Amino acid sequence: MDLDLNALFTVLDSQRVARSLSWNALTREINALFRDVPCHPIATSTITSLESKREVIGNAALQMLVWLDRTPESFLPGHQNSSELDQVLPRLGPDRILRFDTLAIFQAIEAVRVERALTWREVAEEIGGVTAGQLTRLGKGAGIGIVAAGRIAQWLDRPVASFTVASAL
């Protein structure tokens, strides 16, 4: 079951309205979470396009989820309250940013793949919505979308938060 990006958009929009923020002001608040980290800020269009997208850059989605104080799993259709400590995304302070640890994701997949004697293609088919190439590139630091990260975490029976790391870039 995939993370519902439309639901993420709806919750962001409802918080925006409740706080009387424009989309640009909302984006500034989210970007303020990591203002002292030398990286590209999230664009307003990245947030406003969520309702029509099937995937979004995972690291950007993590910042949105931190701002909302919500877990990725809370956006799984039919998911019950996901406030379990292993699922909570940490607030880090303006000099750190939450990122996906793609090497850790790769290593976790590889361990299961080897244990079950699967090919990368078989792993990708079991996870669904990803290719073998996308999975192997994680070992080289390739980026990952939040929906794909959610699929992989479900396949590994781990919370998405277990694959995040605080970074100063």
Image (tube, helix red, strand yellow):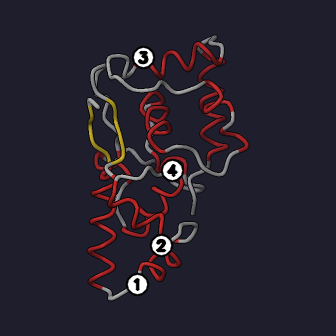
Please say if the residues under marks 3 and 4 sit with CB atoms less than 8 Å apart. no
Q: What kind of residue is marked 1?
A: Thr
Q: Is residue 50 left or right of residue 116?
A: right
Callouts 2 and 3 close, C-beta under 8 Å:
no
Read off the residue under disc 3: 32
Q: Amino acid at mark 4?
A: Gly
Q: Residue at x 32, y 46 (%)?
A: 164
Q: Which residue is mark 2?
A: 132
- Residue 1, compared with residue 125, is above or below; it is above
Separation of residues labelled 2 and 3 (CA atoms): 36 Å
Q: Is residue 30 left or right of residue 78?
A: left
| Quarter in which the C terminus is drawn | top left
Labelled disc at residue 145: 4
- State the residue in front, 81 or 91: 91
What separation in Å lies between label 3 and label 1 (alpha carbons)? 42 Å
Q: Is residue 15 above or below residue 25?
A: below
Q: Nearer the viewer, mark 2 or mark 3?
A: 2
Which residue is at a point 50% across and 39% down the rendered structure image? 61
Write down the residue under mark 1: 119
Q: Could you tell which of marks 3 and 1 lies nearer the N-terminus?
A: 3
Q: Residues within 10 Å of mark 4 (few under 14, many from 20)?
A: some
Q: Residue furthest right?
A: 52
> Label 3: few (<14), some or many (≥20) within 10 Å?
some
Dot 2 amino acid type: Ala
